[in-house]
């Protein structure tokens, strides 16, 4: 077997995080290799190394028997490594042919002008490789999602007649946005692609990975922790390797889990937004941490954003503290006492240019006004109190929010809502992209809030997290609540139970 | 594209037709050969300018230096051909000079925007003002009169009864269309305007393309400047007043999105015709000039309102 791509003892660090720690993988010619791991395990960093977005600090990247320092995705492409992006990189304003050869029009130039006929003919050849019978002059805006993905694969395959050596195709979560029929088609195409290329298939859906790949690597905490031939692999074992530890009660501060109050803070009934979620009903009690689990597209993100007033629902009732409220805009949610900690912290949570105290007082507009002007003394005092209370690590309350670390930004966002007096908190992936130590602090804060009688709606990063933290779990599937699990300490549901309700 | 989306691209043509119908219903002089020639003649210079501006806007940038470049190249040209200020008499040789000057200013726009990382609207606004300033300083408010008949025929001479400027504009449109459809730059303009990150990832030289596009725009403005001088038979710093507004209006009214990626130079041809027909119609109806300006202002805002799917815009800056 010839190895076409190899990462040998690769390490990569970012400030404060060791994203890859002595990682070695190899892909043989005409092999499909699966790569699995939870969010934050280092899969995407590894991918970015292979596609030239990042460079290794230590170790080697060997493509087609040559040690390379890839400078950019284009550089990687020219060496035979083609990435099929999860967020598609097909440009809707260009035609299929234009997309396939974008940036590589050179070979079709005649007297400096592009020979469209020749380019379309070449594109037709590439489309034939993926059994796509479309006119290459079609604008990609007119294609279905699946067709666009095929165009991307065709683009990757267009390399095989144009470079020396083998083509390596990286598929990053290619099925997450496809329908079942399209997934089947994609898998058929992967089987076919094996004749022409080597494939690295990245996914968190274990069954799929096992179905298509010959061999699987499992990553966790920046390391490759397990390698197994798919034929010998068991889903349960892989899962253990991905999670790494038996559920640790202390990690999620389960000893601090409190029994929920009778008092209902938030009551939702018949909430519907076409295409996102349907007839959602639940109650959130004081002191309760209500987890919402579901796959991408289950509607849980949309539900969270709806309750925060970012995407209004079409019908249904929302009651906060027993009073019916209308939430069609963020300011109405804020006024009702709902705080939203978004997953896109940099975009929606922290205002990078404002300092810590300004960020903290942002949602509590009126509280710091005196005669229509901002009372800086009061603002400063409150900020100082909360910085101390939540243990925000910042040089001063005058430090711009943007220069804090992820975990500390998250604390500032939490403080903002606490100051505004929100008693319902929607936490959308509160630990995404922050390192392990900071995660534990955030868990601590979440427990604090529950202990103080706040109601918390949690969209967690992993199943483990949602099970560990929540006192009750709603599972969403296709926009509806498919099951509800009680999750008292000592009788938490298993991940597999949740997964069954999710898919 | 589905439903309304598919037809949205045809809207500007429809607007143009309706406009022509409406005006001819009110004033029968509108539908006459002499008026058509007058229309085309009035459209010639805006057409040339708009070709350059379209590329910049397709790329998602904006170029506000039109008036400055036109003024400076017009003044330069007027002083190079036979005139009452200098003793030069370069004749048609002044034309390549205008193109070079325009191209260089365009290059400066692109360079400042890309290399110094200054937003294009600010870079081009600054360069535009600087150019008007230079033109004013050179002449001290004086107006150069061109005495070169041959040069003036560059716009005024007629071929088949149509002014030469119209033919020149036609050629400019053709060249622009070739650039858009058949060159790599043309392809990359759309790619950058649609999604710069992706374009960069597949290896489109984004920075170089941007500089090129501003340079190409400058070339068109330079040509427009020379045509302005030839048409009026003079050169002065205020010769281009009002050109910027018409240019941007025409591009937008034609259906090219200010956000980039969507549109075409052919859209802009329709856009120029809409603006020119509207102005012509208002003149025929005897509407005072300042009201005409107001109408143009309303026009540009309604065009953006119609073209944008604003429900999907979360943040409007």
Image (cartoon, rainbow, N blue to C red):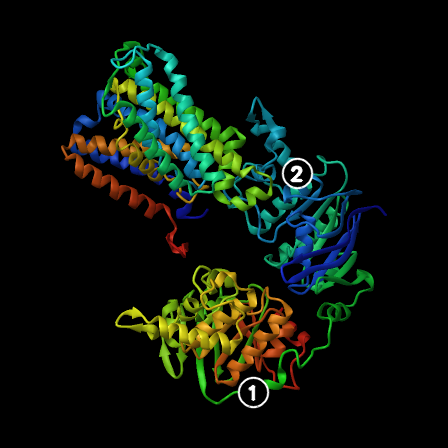
- Asked where in the image residue B9 lies, by quadrant, the reply is top left
> Could you tell me residue A81's position as x and y percent?
70, 44
- Asked where in the image residue B146 lies, by quadrant, the reply is top left
Q: How far apart are marks 1 and 2 (CA)?
A: 60 Å
> Could you tell me residue A425's position as x and y percent?
47, 75
Between A331 and A452, which is closer to the camera in this rendering?
A: A452
Report which residue position mark 2 lands on.
Answer: A126
The mark found on residue A415 in the picture is none
> Could you tell me residue B313's position as x and y percent?
40, 54
Asked whether residue A278 is in view, the answer is no
Please name the residue shown 25% across and 28% down the image.
B238
Total labels drawn: 2
Asked whether residue B163 is in view, the answer is yes
On screen, residue B46 above or below A283: above
Residue B140 in the figure: left or right of residue A499: left
Please name the residue shown 37% across and 24% down the image.
B222
Residue A276 in the figure: left or right of residue A218: left
The C terminus of chain A - image quarter: bottom right
Q: Residues within 10 Å of mark 2 (few under 14, many from 20)?
A: many
Element under disc 1: loop
Element under disc 2: helix
The chain that hosts pointer 1 is A
Q: Residues within 10 Å of mark 1 (few under 14, many from 20)?
A: some
Report which residue position mark 1 lands on.
Answer: A258
Between A304 and A207, which is closer to the camera in this rendering?
A: A304
Q: Which of marks 1 and 2 is in front?
A: 1
The chain that hosts pointer 2 is A
On screen, residue B167 above or below A175: above
Residue A434 in the figure: left or right of residue A317: right
- Which residue is outermost to the right? A1
Please name the residue shown 45% across and 88% down the image.
A263
> Could you tell me residue A328's position as x and y percent?
37, 68
């Amino acid at each position: 077997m010839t190895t076409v791509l190899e990462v040998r003892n690769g390490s990569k660090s970012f400030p404060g995080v060791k994203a890859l720690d002595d990682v070695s993988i190899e892909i043989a010619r005409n092999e499909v290799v699966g790569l699995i791991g939870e969010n934050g395990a280092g899969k995407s960093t590894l991918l970015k190394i292979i596609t030239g977005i990042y460079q290794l600090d230590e170790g080697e990247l060997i493509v087609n028997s040559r040690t390379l320092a890839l400078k950019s995705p284009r550089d990687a492409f020219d060496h035979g490594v083609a990435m099929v992006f999860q967020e598609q990189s097909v440009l809707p304003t260009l035609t299929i042919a234009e997309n396939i050869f974008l940036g590589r029009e050179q070979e079709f130039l005649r007297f400096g002008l592009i020979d469209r006929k020749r380019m379309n003919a070449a594109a037709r050849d590439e489309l034939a490789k993926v059994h796509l019978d479309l006119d290459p002059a079609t604008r990609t805006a007119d294609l279905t999602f699946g067709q666009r993905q095929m165009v991307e694969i065709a683009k990757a395959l267009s390399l095989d007649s144009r470079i020396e050596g083998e083509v390596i195709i990286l598929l990053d979560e290619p099925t997450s946005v496809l329908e079942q029929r399209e997934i089947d088609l994609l898998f058929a195409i992967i089987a076919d692609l094996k004749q022409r290329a080597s494939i690295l298939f990245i996914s968190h859906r274990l069954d799929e990975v096992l179905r298509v790949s010959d061999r699987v690597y499992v990553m966790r905490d920046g390391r490759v922790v397990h390698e197994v031939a798919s034929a010998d692999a068991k889903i349960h074992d892989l899962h253990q390797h991905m999670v790494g530890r038996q559920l640790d009660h202390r990690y999620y501060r389960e000893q601090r889990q409190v029994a929920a109050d009778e008092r209902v803070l938030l009551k939702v009934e018949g909430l519907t937004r076409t295409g996102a979620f349907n007839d959602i009903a639940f109650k959130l009690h004081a002191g309760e941490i209500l987890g919402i689990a579901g796959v991408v597209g289950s509607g849980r993100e949309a539900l969270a954003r709806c309750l925060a007033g970012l995407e209004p629902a079409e019908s249904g009732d929302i009651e906060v503290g027993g009073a019916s409220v209308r939430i069609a805009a963020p300011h109405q949610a804020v006024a009702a006492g709902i705080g939203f900690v978004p997953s896109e912290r940099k975009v929606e949570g922290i205002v990078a240019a404002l300092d810590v105290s300004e960020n903290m007082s942002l949602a509590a507009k009126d509280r710091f006004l005196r005669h229509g002007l901002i009372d800086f003394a009061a603002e400063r005092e409150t900020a100082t109190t909360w910085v101390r209370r939540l243990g925000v690590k910042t040089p001063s309350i005058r430090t711009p929010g943007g220069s804090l670390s992820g975990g500390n930004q998250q604390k500032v966002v939490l403080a903002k809502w606490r100051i505004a007096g929100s008693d319902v908190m929607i936490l959308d992936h509160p630990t995404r992209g922050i390192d392990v130590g900071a995660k534990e602090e955030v868990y601590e804060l979440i427990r604090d809030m529950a202990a103080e009688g706040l109601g918390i709606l949690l969209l967690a990063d992993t199943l483990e997290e949602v099970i560990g933290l929540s006192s009750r779990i709603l599972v969403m599937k296709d926009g509806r609540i498919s099951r509800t699990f009680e999750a008292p300490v000592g009788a938490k549901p298993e991940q597999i139970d949740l997964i069954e309700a999710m898919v | 594209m589905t439903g309304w989306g598919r037809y949205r691209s045809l809207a500007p043509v429809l607007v143009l037709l309706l406009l022509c119908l409406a005006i001819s219903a009110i004033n029968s002089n509108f539908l006459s050969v002499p008026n058509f020639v007058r229309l085309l003649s009035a459209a010639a210079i805006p057409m040339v300018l708009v070709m350059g501006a379209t590329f910049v806007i397709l790329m998602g940038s904006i170029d506000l230096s039109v008036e400055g470049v036109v003024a400076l190249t017009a003044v330069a040209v007027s002083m190079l051909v036979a005139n009452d200020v200098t003793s030069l008499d370069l004749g048609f040789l002044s034309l390549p000079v205008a193109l070079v000057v325009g191209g260089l200013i365009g290059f400066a726009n692109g360079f400042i925007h890309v290399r110094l990382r200054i937003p294009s609207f600010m870079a081009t606004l600054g360069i535009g003002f600087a150019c008007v300033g230079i033109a004013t300083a050179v002449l001290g408010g004086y107006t150069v009169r061109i005495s070169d008949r041959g040069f003036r025929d560059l716009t005024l001479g007629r071929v088949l009864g149509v002014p030469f400027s119209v033919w020149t504009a036609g050629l400019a449109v053709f060249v622009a269309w070739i650039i858009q459809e058949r060159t790599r730059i043309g392809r990359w303009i759309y790619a950058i305007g649609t999604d710069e990150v992706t374009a960069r990832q597949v290896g489109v030289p984004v920075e170089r393309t941007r500089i090129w596009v501003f340079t190409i725009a400058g070339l068109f403005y330079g040509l427009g400047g020379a045509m302005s001088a030839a048409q009026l038979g003079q050169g002065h710093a205020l010769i281009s007043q009002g050109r910027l507004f018409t240019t941007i209006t025409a591009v937008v009214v034609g259906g090219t999105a200010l956000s980039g990626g969507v549109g075409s130079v052919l859209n802009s041809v329709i856009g120029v015709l809409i603006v020119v027909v509207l102005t012509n119609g208002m003149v025929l109806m005897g509407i005072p000039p300042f009201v005409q300006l107001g109408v143009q202002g309303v026009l540009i805002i309604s065009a953006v309102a119609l073209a944008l799917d604003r429900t999907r815009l979360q943040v409007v800056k």
